Image (spheres, rainbow, N blue to C red):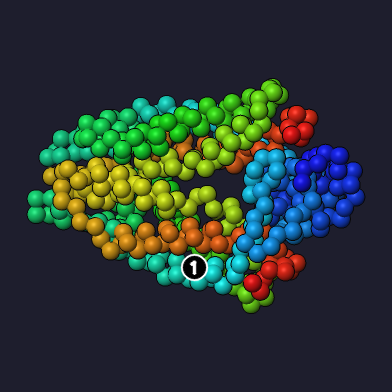
Amino acid sequence: MCDVDDSRELIELPLEQLAACHECDLLMRKPELALGERAECPRCGFELFSHRPQMLQRSLALALAALLLYIPANFLPIMHLHLLGQTTQDTVWSAVRSLYDGGLRVIAVVVFLCSMGIPLLKLLCQLAVLLCIRWDVGRVHGLFLYRTYHHLREWGMLEVYLMGILVSIVKLIALANIEMGIGLACFIGLLLLQIWLEVVMSPQQVWEALSGESRYAGH
Amino acid sequence: MRAIEAGLLICPECHQLNRQDSDHGRQRCTRCGASVHARHPHSLARTWALLITAAILYIPANLLPIMTVSALGQGEPDTIMSGVVALVQAGSLPIALVVFVASILVPTFKLVGIALLLISVQRKQPLSARQRIVMFRFIEWIGRWSMLDVFVIAILVALVNFGTLARVEADLGAMAFASVVILTMLAAITFDPRLIWDNTESHDDQE
């Protein structure tokens, strides 16, 4: 794909047959992908395209399932702590509340955004984008929402939060009696669904479907 | 060849190619409407600014206590390092290692790594572009894991709340630490990785 002698030919090709790597700016001929195939940049190895079968149906199912788990994951107790006859419990939301009440409001807001706010916004953006494609309405808004999703992507940190739960358990286990709650199972479920959704919902296919140039939308 | 030499601009958000308008100051992507530039404007200056702010906050983040653990009325402030030491003493080495990597090694590595990338681009040093892009991707990917300690504090504050018997409170160091993590993440976003390839074009294209 990366022939230098080819460069004059490349310039003369129409825009639709060209692609450039987002990471290193290498210009190349757009590869034709069959179902299930993916293409990487020949120079820097960045994944450029991947073509997943039944992207729309599978992503919709995953996004809906993740949204169903969202409330139990955030508002049901993750764990209970027993110490000398007293019991406290912790939910994702109560952790934010107690930080806020403790006076470090900025930290409370940061934790709220990374563990609750942005993951929810991301899921809602993804769902709205998928529905735009499915029902063929409001593609302009769909484009805007999908751009928003890409800006938010890095700031949702559910997997880091799960590791935080693990570290807290290890810190407390010697001092007091800990019991896992149902919220933890829901939280892990939400995390797994969200990762799976990110894998299935291949960006290039979504952009093409949103801009109406898609051959894939029905798949 | 690079897209920039063919007069083509790649959209930073949807990766669509756009022909460069010569007379336009501000060009928008034909597909998604994001503004497109050959390279992010002022990428180096913005990244430096964020990085230097992060480096300054790095000092209070490591020196100030991030939380206070009090038992029976006696408070004991915990810094990031003392938290790791406590985990080692408690015998949970794997978790101590995870916390050490996430809260001490990664922020330090990010500060040094991004500074090295910036210097290598500005001085046009002939370092291997592939090695640098691998380093950049690693920095980009690992940055969020440093939030680990902030989440641990949040969970402990909620959970260990037994009045005078035992309680955990968050301290100012946590604020500085969270700022360092957020600022270095922003620095990784403002850095334009295409700059790494710009002055190595002649060598690497021949591969």
Which residue in the structure is indicated by mark 1?
A: A62
Determine whether the residue tagged by mark 1 lies in a helix, strand or loop. helix
Residue nearest the viewer, comparing A59 with B195: A59
What's the residue at 75%, 29% (across, down)?
Answer: B203
Residue B17 seen in this snapshot: no
User: Callout 1: 10 Å neighbours few (<14), some, many (20+)?
Assistant: many
Give the quarter of the figure containing the C terminus of chain B.
top right
- State which quadrant residue A127 falls in: bottom right
How many marks the image carries: the answer is 1
- Residue A87 spot, x, y in % from top left: 16, 56
Q: Residue furthest bottom?
A: A135
Q: Residue furthest left?
A: A85
Could you say which quadrant of the image residue A35 lies in?
bottom right
Q: Is residue B139 left or right of residue B25?
A: left
- Residue drawn at (42%, 51%) of the image: A159
Q: Residue B81: x and y, percent?
A: 32, 29
In this rendering, the answer to whether A125 lies above or below B40 is below
Quadrant containing the N terminus of chain B is top right
Q: Is residue B108 above or below residue A139?
A: above
Name the kind of residue labelled 1 in the image. Answer: Leu
> In the figure, is residue A170 to the left or right of A123?
left
Would you say A69 lies left or right of B113 here? left
Q: Nearer the viewer, residue A22 or B172?
A: A22
Note whether A70 is above or below A79 in the view shown: below
Q: On the rendered structure, is B21 left or right of A105? A: right
